Image (spheres, grey):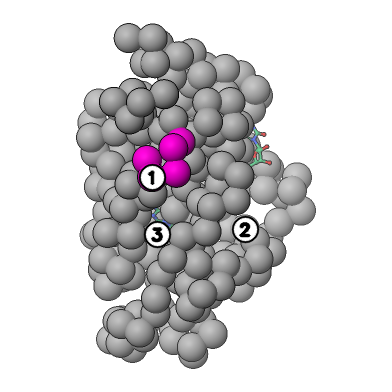
């Protein structure tokens, strides 16, 4: 497939709305590079916590970020952020401790600026590695990072259903509280961008959501 048919897909939504599971399934079906930007914020939060920085100290965070090198490690369809030469284990990124601070670190403009160029640069990484396209998920992908994406989707689900999904995974996570911080911050808040397609998955299975979006991607590829 030539780079002229390269497609970019942005998926945003609140915590446990199904972004990662949906993106994973679609990336393997269509040969897209999958980038989970929530993991980027978790990785940066972990590095800052390890350096003794708290989210109320923006100055120290900015200082610390100056000396942190970023890299990308691609395994299968998944592109992950390496920080200081290391890709942290998923288990270390999803602890109750990181769940409790990640949304606060994500409010800091210095943290968002730190990731902006890196995240936009993932389009070039996916092209270099001959993927058929890029699927990037987060909170501000369709609004700030890739507003020109070919397909912009916003996943929604009732907060009670989302908290139950996390609980079913056996995870401790204040889903509603994180959403509140994410939706009310000044820089790049969680919003459904104008022109994006909303999908409410409260009463849909993961497979149903995947099929719905797969239909949209196929239509795009057959244009
Ligand atoms: O990435 P995000 O936090 O938005 O959500 P996720 O980690 O993909 O999904 C959270 C959990 O909800 C997973 O265990 C999914 O299998 C489940 N899920 C679901 O039960 N029904 C859906 N329609 C979507 C996801
Ligand atoms: O998996 P889940 O939806 O619970 O969260 P995540 O996608 O791993 O994102 C963790 C946190 O990172 C979010 O609660 C946001 O505070 C932040 N985030 C963000 O601000 N912007 C993004 N594009 C992605 C995540």
Q: CA distance from mark 2 to mark 3?
A: 14 Å
Q: Secondary structure at mark 1?
A: helix
Instruction: Give the answer, above or below, for where 54 lies relative to 32.
Output: below
Location of residue 27 by image quarter: top right
Q: Secondary structure at mark 2?
A: loop
Magenta segment: 127-131
Label 3 Cα crowd, 10 Å radius (few <14 / some 14-19 / many 20+)? some
**Magenta stretch: residue 177 in it?**
no
Compared across the picture, whether 21 is left or right of 190 comes to right
Q: Is mark 3 within 8 Å of ligand 2?
A: yes
Label 2 Cα crowd, 10 Å radius (few <14 / some 14-19 / many 20+)? many
Q: Is mark 1 within 8 Å of ligand 2?
A: no
Give the label on residue 128, or none: 1
- Ranked by sequence position, the earlier of labels 2 and 3 is 2
From the viewer's side, name the closer residue of 139 and 218: 218
Please give the residue where the numbered disc 2 appears in the rendered image. Answer: 173
Q: Which residue occupies 40% across, 59% down? A: 181
Please give the residue where the numbered disc 3 appears in the rendered image. Answer: 181
Compared across the picture, whether 200 is left or right of 146 comes to right
- Ranked by sequence position, the earlier of labels 3 and 1 is 1
From the viewer's side, name the closer residue of 185 and 111: 111
Q: Secondary structure at mark 3?
A: helix
């Amino acid at each position: 497939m030539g780079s002229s048919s390269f497609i970019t897909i942005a998926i945003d939504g609140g915590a446990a709305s199904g972004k990662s599971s949906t993106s994973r399934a679609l990336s393997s079906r269509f040969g897209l590079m999958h980038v989970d930007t929530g993991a980027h914020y978790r990785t940066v939060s972990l590095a800052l916590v390890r350096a003794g920085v708290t989210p109320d100290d923006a100055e120290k965070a900015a200082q610390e970020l100056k000396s942190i090198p970023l890299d990308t490690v691609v395994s299968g369809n998944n592109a992950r952020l390496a920080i200081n030469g290391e890709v942290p284990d998923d288990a270390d990124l999803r602890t109750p401790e990181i769940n409790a601070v990640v949304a606060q670190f994500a409010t800091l403009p210095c943290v968002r600026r730190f990731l902006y160029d890196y995240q936009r640069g993932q389009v070039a990484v996916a092209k270099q590695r001959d993927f058929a396209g890029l699927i990037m998920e987060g909170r501000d992908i369709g609004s700030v990072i890739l507003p020109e994406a070919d397909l912009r989707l916003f996943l929604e689900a009732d907060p009670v259903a989302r908290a139950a999904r996390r609980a079913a995974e056996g995870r401790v996570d204040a889903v509603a509280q994180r959403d509140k911080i994410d939706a009310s911050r000044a820089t790049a808040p969680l919003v459904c961008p104008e022109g994006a397609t909303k999908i409410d998955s409260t009463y849909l299975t993961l497979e149903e959501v995947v099929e719905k979006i797969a239909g949209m991607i196929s239509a795009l590829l057959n244009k």
